[in-house]
């Protein structure tokens, strides 16, 4: 039985006390240079405790030690892990060099082994990045088959989760999600090594992100959190993974935690420089500042996101809306929505376009964007997208002067947000429902909806939205009457410009009967009896310029 630092290190490694294992291995190595297997353990412990650069050196030493000991397969595997770490940090040339060394090592020994499957994974990832989804899925499937042949659960989990990602990109979402779930079962059952568990989890989160499947992401996050809690000093979440986790926290209304996680992602992705995803991390920081009503901080973070390669939309357009520059917001989001073609990005642009277009009185643009959201929701059948689509549809109906029709989709959206445990989005749906209730004469119902929304927004710190609710209440109290819809304001402007109902119908592209309904509604709301009185009201209250 070993004694001293090396014995303590191996025992700590067995207990998965990674920090202790690493410290003891370093101490043992100072006494006597470690053999190959212990160098490999030191590389793993360094990686799991966030000592990235130290881990690189240990993998390199372990690689050479295994070759010297006559174990080229194990040496190739060490070279593989070193290459993957380098490539994830943007050091692609060094990573490619180590992959070539691993391939040459296996070619020289000439034996069939599990490591040949590991070396298929980078090629499968390259194909996925190039858009060859089916080719990527086939390469991952071949790697999984090799893993099964050699009973290597790490390789099987890595390959199956990669195959799942590729199938999702290929539009075969049901098959892809099943493989993601299978890979995560292997993680939470303790069948794979910790170094693989983190990679699989981050890949699964990214797959869920592409499908807007936040419910599945939440479930696997909870499961992995329990698994991580059993291991001391573990740093399982890297920059990109922290980013996905921050998005989940944001959805759940845990904005302070989300901001801390996103800032941590920025720090880890900035050092060493060149890592992919730094711009996305700054974008997440900016979004959280925007939601918290901190425009200056949001502005700077959006600028950093742009500097690091992440286009700052739709968040920057929504910030301009918050700052009252509706024209700039609408121009920016229209360009972004026109350019967005990927299903991962287009729904977000369309949702922002609905909100901004309605604020600008561009009802037809909002209606078209809401229709695009409905199509996306039908295609993916994700509760998150269904909620976004139904809420957008309700907002458009409300702006079109159809509060009774708006209530059903708004209630559906509110229920979906409740099931997704998304308090901010649920509160926004309830604010829209309050407006619909008020326009229908249900003042009590409107007040209840506003009270519930305000309580939720207060709890999560949504200062900007709370200010808007406060202004809405003050305006209603001062006016003693329900507000006009966006469409009614348009009609009022055109009445003041001297247009007849037929002229208004032609201008807005709606029926004359619909115009008559809007005119009747605004006359009742404003207690007016004639078009001349409506014109005077419009000029007096700044609805049209004097």
Image (cartoon, helix red, strand yellow):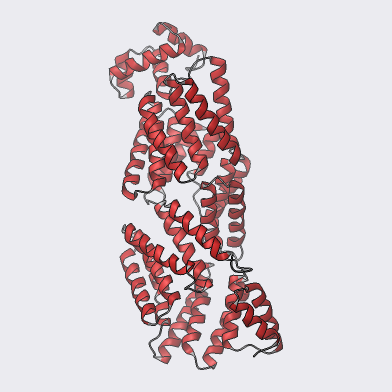
Front residue of this view, candidates 251 and 101: 251
What residue is at 58 percent from the left and 32 percent from the top?
A: 466
Residue 177: which quarter of the image?
A: bottom left
Residue 491: which quarter of the image?
A: top left
Horizontal and vertical percent for residue 193?
51, 74
Front residue of this view, candidates 137 and 270: 137
Q: Is residue 178 above or below residue 453?
A: below
The reply to whether residue 464 is visible in this rendering is: yes
Horizontal and vertical percent for residue 469?
55, 29
Q: Is residue 412 left or right of residue 430?
A: left
Q: Is residue 417 left or right of residue 269?
A: left
Q: Is residue 39 above or below residue 395?
A: below
What residue is at 42 percent from the left and 91 percent from the top?
A: 108
Front residue of this view, candidates 247 and 4: 4
Q: Is residue 67 left or right of residue 148?
A: right
Horizontal and vertical percent for residue 70?
50, 93
Horizontal and vertical percent for residue 419?
45, 44
Q: Quadrant of the N terminus?
A: bottom right
What residue is at 54 percent from the left and 67 percent from the top?
A: 89
């Amino acid at each position: 039985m070993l004694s001293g630092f090396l014995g303590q290190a191996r025992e700590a490694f067995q207990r998965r006390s990674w920090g202790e294992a690493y410290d003891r291995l370093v101490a043992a190595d100072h006494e006597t240079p470690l053999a190959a297997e212990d160098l490999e353990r030191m590389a793993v412990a360094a990686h799991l405790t966030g000592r990235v650069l130290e881990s690189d050196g240990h993998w390199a030493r372990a690689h050479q030690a295994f070759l010297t000991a006559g174990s080229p397969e194990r040496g190739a595997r060490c070279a593989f892990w070193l290459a993957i770490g380098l490539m994830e940090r943007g050091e692609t040339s060094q990573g490619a060099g180590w992959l070539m060394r691993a391939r040459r090592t296996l070619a020289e020994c000439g034996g069939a082994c599990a490591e040949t499957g590991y070396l298929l994974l980078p090629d499968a990832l390259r194909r996925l990045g190039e858009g060859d989804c089916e080719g990527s899925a086939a390469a991952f499937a071949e790697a999984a088959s090799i893993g099964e042949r050699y009973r290597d659960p790490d390789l099987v989990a890595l390959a199956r989760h990669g195959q799942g990602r590729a199938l999702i990109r290929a539009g075969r979402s049901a098959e892809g999600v099943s493989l993601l779930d299978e890979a995560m079962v292997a993680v939470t059952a303790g069948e794979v090594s910790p170094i693989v568990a983190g990679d699989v989890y981050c890949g699964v989160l990214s797959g869920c992100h592409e499908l807007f499947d936040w419910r599945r992401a939440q479930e696997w996050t909870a499961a992995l959190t329990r698994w991580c809690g059993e291991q001391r000093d573990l740093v399982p979440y890297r920059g990109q993974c922290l980013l996905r986790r921050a998005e989940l926290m944001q959805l759940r209304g845990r904005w302070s935690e989300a901001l801390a996680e996103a800032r941590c992602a920025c720090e880890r992705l900035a050092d060493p420089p060149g890592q992919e995803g730094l711009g996305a991390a700054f974008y997440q920081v900016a979004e959280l500042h925007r939601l918290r009503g901190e425009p200056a901080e949001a502005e700077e973070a959006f600028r950093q996101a742009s500097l690091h390669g992440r286009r700052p939309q739709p968040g920057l357009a929504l910030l301009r809306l918050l700052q009252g520059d509706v024209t700039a917001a609408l121009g920016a989001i229209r360009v972004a929505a026109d350019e967005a073609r990927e299903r991962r990005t287009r729904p977000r642009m369309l949702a922002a376009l609905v909100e901004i277009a309605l604020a600008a009185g561009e009802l037809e643009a909002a209606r078209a964007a809401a229709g695009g959201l409905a199509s996306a929701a039908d295609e993916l059948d994700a509760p998150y997208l269904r909620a976004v689509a139904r809420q957008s549809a309700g907002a458009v109906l409300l702006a079109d002067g159809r509060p009774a029709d708006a209530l059903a989709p708004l209630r559906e959206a509110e229920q979906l947000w409740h099931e997704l445990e998304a308090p901010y989005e649920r509160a926004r749906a309830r604010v829209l429902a309050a407006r619909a209730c008020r326009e229908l004469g249900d003042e009590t119902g409107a007040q209840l909806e506003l009270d519930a929304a305000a309580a939720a927004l207060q709890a999560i710190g949504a200062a900007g939205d709370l200010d808007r609710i406060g202004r809405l209440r003050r305006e209603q109290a001062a006016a003693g009457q329900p507000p006009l819809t966006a469409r009614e304001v348009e009609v009022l402007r055109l009445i003041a410009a001297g247009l007849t109902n037929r002229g208004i119908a032609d201008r807005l592209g709606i029926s004359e009967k619909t115009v008559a309904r809007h005119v009747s509604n605004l006359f009742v709301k404003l207690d007016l009896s004639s078009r001349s009185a409506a014109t005077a009201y419009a000029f007096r209250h700044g609805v049209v310029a004097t």
